[in-house]
Amino acid sequence: MKYILNISRIIVGVLFIFSGLVKANDPLGLSYKMQEFFEIWGWGFLDNYTLAFSVAMIAFEIIAGVAVLVGWQMRLFSWLLLILIVFFTFLTGYAHFSDKVRECGCFGDCIPLTADQSFMKDLILLVLIGVIFLNRNKIKPSMPSFASVAILFFATIFSFAIQWYVLLHLPVVDCLPYKIGNNIPEKMKVPAGAIPDSTVISFVYNKDGKDVEFTAAQFPDDFDDSLYKFVKRYDKVVRKGNATPKINDFSLQTFFKNDTTQALLQEDRYQLYLFLKHDYNKGDWTQAMEVLLQTATQKNIRGFLVTSLAVEEVLDPQSPAVFQKLLPLHLDPVALKTAARANPTLFLIKQGTIVGKWSYSDLARAMPVLMALKANPPAGQ
């Protein structure tokens, strides 16, 4: 039994630390996944708190994983782990059986798991944590108390520090479809060899005041127009495929509602795109952006402001003056969340390929890159 207990501790501890570190690379990703669940459940009032929930949950995963490995305060942590895994199993089980969430964000965007894979993982973890919980009084610390506390202290500092860093800058490892080197138009295409959804035509009729549904191959034997009143027909998905582009909601529109996505991304010219969400950070970054735009102008590089803000907010005299020097484009808020983890984020793009990408905190790093670029030919050439 001692052997099984030790193996369970190692697996649980390592997996929790690994899961926490992967999610710590992009805490906003988990925050957005929480908002997805809250939207389904009608808990939208919690959206403003999801980032705090995300940071705390990620930190706890790392800390709990370390505590399990060193065997520190296992009476407390076994209870906390059991509560957490029951909660996780409920979430992944809901996603799996309701089919309303395709990926649960268990390992962030770097290791996407389907809902059923996440559910099976949590069931296995539930068993392993159950073993730890039932034998919590037998687990002894593997090192002196002072050393255990010191390790937990540094694990706590690290778990919050890494999340603070990526929120201020950008994820250390970019696993999103908008990473440097990716071509946006290519990512908007269905991958080669992808399997489309398998569908059947389904009919809904009303009989005796109740809606009944059947496919073309399953019409009832007593079907008659006098008994069955047509309600609707639709394509019912019977097997989900994978024919979904990595980017499927990227549509740059002028404020006159004209889609200019392909026209802009096909230009064989360097372009700057400042991606700005509505709750953008205000501060000294606007000064750095002003300097960048001066250099961009000298090199005939156009700058665009990609935002979900209304045109009135963009042109508001109270808004940063740099906004007036950028051509405004509208993008769906969901696409903005994926493209720009930091708010705002600057992209350097040429012919749809992302050449550079910087957080508002790192705009100074964009200057050497911009200075080294060959100038675009004058407009019209």
Image (spheres, rainbow, N blue to C red):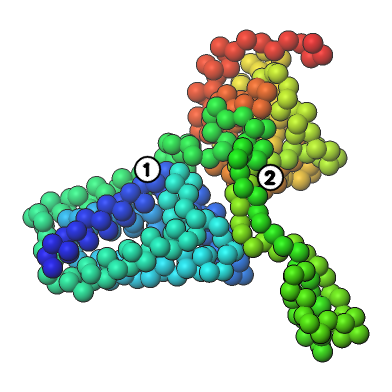
Q: Determine the image quadrant of residue 101.
A: bottom right
Q: Residue at x 13, y 68 (%)?
A: 1
Indicate the position of residue 149 as horizontal and vertical percent values. 17, 55
**Which secondary structure, mark 2?**
loop
Give the alpha-carbon distance from disc 2 to disc 1, as whole Å.
30 Å
Dot 2 corresponds to which residue? 249
Does residue 322 show up?
no
Residue at image location 82% in from the left, 14% down from the top:
380
Q: Which residue type carries mark 2?
A: Asp
Residue 181 quadrant: top right
Badge 1 element: helix
Pointer 1 residue: 162
> Could you tell me the amino acid type at mark 1?
Ile
Q: Is residue 352 above or below residue 128?
A: above
Q: Nearer the viewer, residue 354 or 228?
A: 228
Residue 215: image location, x then y, percent: 74, 70
In-front residue for pair 144/211: 211
Q: Residue at x 61, y 44 (%)?
A: 194
